[in-house]
Image (cartoon, coloured by chain):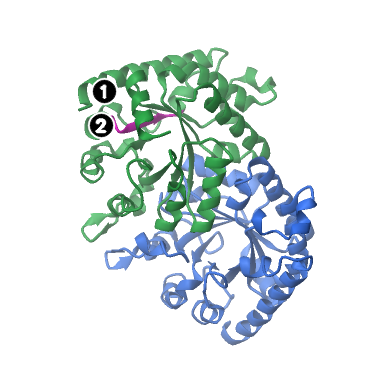
Chain colours: A blue, B green
Amino acid sequence: MNRQELIAQITKKQSFLCVGLDTEMAKLPAHLLREDDPVFAFNKAIIDATAPYTVAYKPNIAFYECYGIQGWRSLEKTVEYVHSTYPEIFLIADAKRGDIGNTSKMYAQAFFENLPFDSVTVAPYMGEDSVTPFLSYVGKWAIVLALTSNKGAFDFQCLESEGKELYKHVLETSQKWGSDETMMYVVGATKAAMLHEIRTIVPNHFLLVPGVGAQGGNLHEVAQYGMNSDCGLLVNSSRAIIFADNTEQFAQVAGEKAKEMQMEMAALLKEYRK
Amino acid sequence: MNRQELIAQITKKQSFLCVGLDTEMAKLPAHLLREDDPVFAFNKAIIDATAPYTVAYKPNIAFYECYGIQGWRSLEKTVEYVHSTYPEIFLIADAKRGDIGNTSKMYAQAFFENLPFDSVTVAPYMGEDSVTPFLSYVGKWAIVLALTSNKGAFDFQCLESEGKELYKHVLETSQKWGSDETMMYVVGATKAAMLHEIRTIVPNHFLLVPGVGAQGGNLHEVAQYGMNSDCGLLVNSSRAIIFADNTEQFAQVAGEKAKEMQMEMAALLKEYRK
């Protein structure tokens, strides 16, 4: 999916919501455990209930990989279902991959050729040749970690070198590898106040913002400091939507939570998109 | 596998060779393509031919993940085969994983519970809570990227902060998270001369050293600058062993290449292990 299509969808749905499919077996509603593939049954119901309010889905690959072949099958069915039923929705493989060039090339094949993902999250530690293999597909994206939402972000990402923090070096250096048509950045919502400064370095790039909801980030601040004239934001919520309820009404409740966020986002688009 | 068992195996085999199973379908000997699972058939033959000279196998997860379910099945069969047939051999999932705590926990389950790996390579960019979930298993290891063997290593890993490079911060800070019984570090052989300084920071830790052979690193220098009294090294070779030949004799030739490296390593252990 290219940038124009993504922006058009945000405008149409008045939403920049990404729903994180961190589907944990232990948290599934009990009645789903009787299904052949409880993870896919859960995801399908969540997707159908939230799709009107959502511009992106983000399966967290670890939550599938931990079940081996069975998990990979649930993942495959989930992304094929989104891709065929809601082709306008942007698919993010939250995989945090990154290795030497010939290996990153294989990861790109895994998510862009073998599966119909639009984008993959990528860790920048290994530098240029670990990221560029994800940039050679038309309409596909690398979403590079800049400043993450967790406590450990402060261990290395904020180390200062030549007068600026590591995550700013990542933002500046990586811009030479690809354009705002092929790269986005991860910036955690728990660091919303830092978005203002980040926008001076990457005014046009889309930012994928995790950490709203369960991790404590504030949606209003994210929009206030991070939105640009194309919106330029995908804000992820996982647990606060998909595990809002664990009865037989789980999907309906998830839909309501997604709708609440979409309405909040519509108001923020009106206020801050300029 | 614990540290003592690994050291005992190195001493017994007079080898610190890790064979990288970067099994690329396009490079397989033609006659194997008739097999049900060509990747497993190749790996099994390579493993049987090289096991006497090898203390570790390192499947590169990308090369399996790129084939989806089929690839995951080949991976599962490969590591189960090593684990049951050569239980003394150390298994490394070269996966470069790392995410927020609840997600890294799932990756640890994927490789330590669902599969019988002894260790996983982990990217440090997201800091402490992205690594610690891999450290809570007795006899299992996180192998943290410090200084990698690729060109992109110079983009961020060598940025200086407070008088020292990022990779040195990684080495120093991460030592607070686990001991030399649960953590190793990746240090590329293409940077062998930097091993001397690295040993002043991590004198006791095992180092996983990729980049010997196809990537141009020098084994003698690695031993000279990196070996300690427990050996403290696992040197990986992938393509130079597994793809040394692509006829029906591929496994025999791979065994000969592994034996050559083992003999070189036996001499280096005699010269530098002290």
The verdict on residue A272 being magenta is no
Residue that appears at 74% across and 56% down: A83
B82 lies left or right of B52: right
The residue under the point 41% across, 25% down is B55
In the rendered image, residue B5, in percent from the top left (x then y), is placed at: 38, 29
Amino acid found under the numbered disc labelled 1: Leu
Q: Secondary structure at mark 2?
A: loop
Q: Is residue B232 magenta?
A: yes
Question: Is A259 located above or below residue A153 in the figure?
Answer: below
What mark, if any, has residue B149 been given in the picture? none
Locate residue B165, reporting x and y percent: 27, 53
Residue at figure coordinates x 30%, y 27% from the top left: B219
Q: Is residue A164 left or right of residue A11?
A: left
Circles 1 and 2 in contact, beta carbons < 8 Å: yes
Chain for disc number 1: B
Q: Which residue is mark 1?
A: B269
In magenta, the rendered stretch is B227-238
> Subunit of mark 2?
B
Q: Is residue A219 above or below residue B105?
A: below
Which quadrant, please, contains the C terminus of chain A? bottom right
Dot 2 amino acid type: Met
Q: Which residue is under mark 2?
A: B227
- Residues at marks 1 and 2, CA–CA distance in whole angstroms: 8 Å
Image position of B87 with respect to B181: above or below = above
Residue at 68% x, 81% y is A263
Crowd around label 1: few <14 · some 14–19 · many ≥20 (10 Å): many
Estimate the x, y position of residue B61 in percent, counting from the top left.
Answer: 54, 39
